Every structure is written in structure tokens, then in C-alpha cells.
Amino acid sequence: MVQNSETSQLLGELTNLVGREDPYPRYDRLREIAPLIRADDGALVVTGYADCATVVRDGRLAHMSPDMLAFIGFEDWREHPALKLLFTSILNLNPPDHTRLRRLVSSAFTARRVQALRRAIERMVDELLAGMSGEADFIQAFAFPLPANVIGELLGVPPADRAQFQSLIRDWSQVLEYIDREQLVTADAAAATVYDYLAGLADQRRRKPADDLISAMVEAESAGDRLTGEELLTMAGLLFAAGFETTTNLLANSVMVLDRHPEAVIGDPALAVEELLRFDSPVQLVGRLAHEDVELGGTVVEAGERVIAYTGAGNRDPRRFTDPGRLDLSRADNAPLSFGGGIHYCLGAPLARLEAQIAIPVLRDRVRVCGEPTRRDSLTLRGYTAMPVRTT
């Protein structure tokens, strides 16, 4: 386990926009120094593929209880909508609560329901591109509205109501990156608005069910268990946020990567999407708490230790991927860690993949970056807030 001035500097650079613009050389150097690094705040950092895979898959490395927020000064976390809505969702729960809630929602979030959206996604892609004649901001014109409309269609959010959620979810999701009192004012207001909207929509579906996921979740039950009203709204909020936030970043990152690699040719869209997920992942890190002793990087991590897995670094590990810095859209045996793993594997991964497999080949042919994009100031969620493009 290593901690020195160089590792402190490298990890520090990853917390600012300059380092986040291209984190990969810093990941490479951290991986060269040691498989396990002690950060200044005491957390243990891993950057290798095998260790990152262990972190996201091994049940001994679990999410921290939301009550741990008290140790960073937020004893009142339940009074903050942004924290309560996030930290009581399955994104941050452990078994048995996670097991029960995921089982209930999985019964509604089926492969059949996802695949039934294929034609709708194809239509949306065509319509959005048709509206992008000349120059446009790719984020506003395509990367946000496509997944927002898809998850809105799946959940049952009316089309006219979907646009408001881009800024709301972005403000709320800031708490994934950092938490402070000033930032919470904005995040809480956004989370409360999302919660109140979904509460009204759920009430409508209780009175008049429809063929959508909100209605299905209202009816979801297994072994006598039901989603409570609060659990349903927490789940719906998470699905809506995750349903477009990461996919928006996947689409934007892919357009930028492909623009910088004009030689890359898309053959099989499924292989291409896996490579783009690996090459510049929309999610770059996850955090866990060791609930039991577990070995990482040849060292026993003791129960109670915090662990940060830079999965974006694991996706570029030369011990797992041949020539990992090279974009290869036909790369076989590809298994990026971009959707996590184990019991916390992303519920929406099949939907995100379907959207990307439909959209990216068309975007490759029709869209070119024509100006300097604006990088989102985040590493947990890696993407852009603006990207000028020209359609052909």
C-alpha cells in the first residue's frame, strides 16, 4: 500500500477540471506506482481491472450505510431530499433491502419491455436528427432528449413534462460528486421537485393504470412484499435519473471519441458500443466499504476501510486489454466495468445499450463536432454540458 507526494498530487488532479479532461495518463501512472494506494482522506484506491472487478462484484465490499453521512457532518441527512432520495434508493442499499426492492422492480423492468421500445427509439433518433439541420448543441438537441424521452416513455412521463428534468437531475446528482451545505440548497430543491412530480404521477396511475413502468411498479409484488409509496417514488426517481444521465454521457462521449478517431469503422454495433463504454466510460468510479476483510492488490483490506475503485482506469488496464489506449470497435472479449457488477449491476444497462446501438452508427455517419465542447465538472459521471456539432 503506497501513499506519497506523487500519489497525492495525481489523486488531487483528478478532483479538478484540468485533470478530469484527460484522466487516463494519471490512471496509468497510479497503476504503475502500486495496485493499492492510500488517499489523503484515508480511502484506499484501486486502478487495476481485476481489483476494480472485485470491488463492484464482491459482496464483502458493500455500500456505506447512509447513517455514515453523520461522520461528515450530516446527521440531518434525512431532512435533505437530495440525500434521502439518493441514499435510500437501491443505488446505495445493501441486502436484504436491496434484494427485495431489486426483485420487485426487476419484475416490471423486463427485457420484453425494453425490446418493445426498439421501434420507438429508431423513430426518436430519426426525428431528433431531422431537427438538427446545420449547427446545434448535441447535448440539448440529441444526447439529452433521446434517453429522456425513452425513459420517460418507459416510466410513463408525458412528453411535455420531460424537458424540465435535465437541469433538475443534474442539480440533484451533484451529491454523487461532493456534498456541502451550500450545494445542498440547489440539490434539495431539485430532488423535492422530482419527488413531488413523481408522487402526482403515481397517484394518477393508481386511479387509472396505463401500460408503463410506474403502473407496473404500483402493481409489483413478490412473496407478499410490495413497494411502499415512498420506495416506489425513490425507485422511479432513480430510474429516471439514471435512465438518461449516464446514457446522455455515453452518447456524447462516443461522438467525441469517434470524431477524434475518423479511421474507426463500426461493423457490429454491439461490439462498437462495448468498446466505446470501455474507452471513455460515462461512469468512472465507485465507492464501497469493506464489511469483512478482503484481499485487494495483494493486500488484506480490513473491515471498516473505505475503497474507491476507478473503474475507468480498470477499463484501460493493459493486463486485461491488449493495447488498451487504442480504440478498436471490433474488439472481442470485451467486458468493461462501466455498468458495475454483482448485485448492483445497472438495471438499465440493456436499455442504455439498445439506445446506443441504434443511435451511434447513425451519429457516426451524420454528426461532426465543429467547436470546443464544455466538459462537465465531474469524474464520477464523465461527460459534457455542451458540444457544438454540425449534421450532414
Image: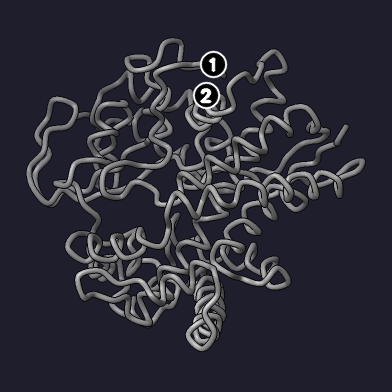
Count neighbours of disc 1 (C-alpha within 10 A) and say few if under 14, some if 14 to 19, many if 20 or more.
some
Q: Residue at x 37, y 80 (%)?
A: 230
**Circle 1: element type:** loop
Q: Which quarter of the figure is the C terminus placed in? A: top right
Q: Residues within 10 Å of mark 2 (few under 14, many from 20)?
A: some
Q: Which residue is at the far right?
A: 134
Closest to the observer, 107 or 158 = 107
Compared with 358, 264 (above or below) is above
Is 208 displayed left or right of 98 in the figure?
right
27 sits left or right of 274 in the view: left
Q: Nearer the viewer, residue 343 or 350?
A: 350
Image spot of residue 252 (x, y percent):
65, 40
**Mark before the other along the chain sequence, 1 or 2:** 2
- Kindly indicate whether the residue at mark 2 contacts the one at mark 1 (C-beta within 8 angstroms): yes
* Quarter of image, res 5: top left
User: In the picture, which quadrant includes the N terminus?
Assistant: top left
Could you say which disc has been placed on residue 271 in the image? Answer: 2
Residue type (three-letter) at the residue carrying disc 2: Leu
Residue 380 lies, in percent from the top left, at 46, 47
Relative to 166, does residue 354 appear above or below in the rendering?
Answer: above
| Residue at 48% over, 26% down | 24
Spatial CA span between label 1 and label 2: 6 Å
Where does the image place residue 189, in percent across and percent down from the top left?
55, 78
Q: Residue at x 68, y 33 (%)?
A: 255
Report the residue marked by disc 1.
Answer: 330
Residue at the (36%, 42%) spot, across then down: 340
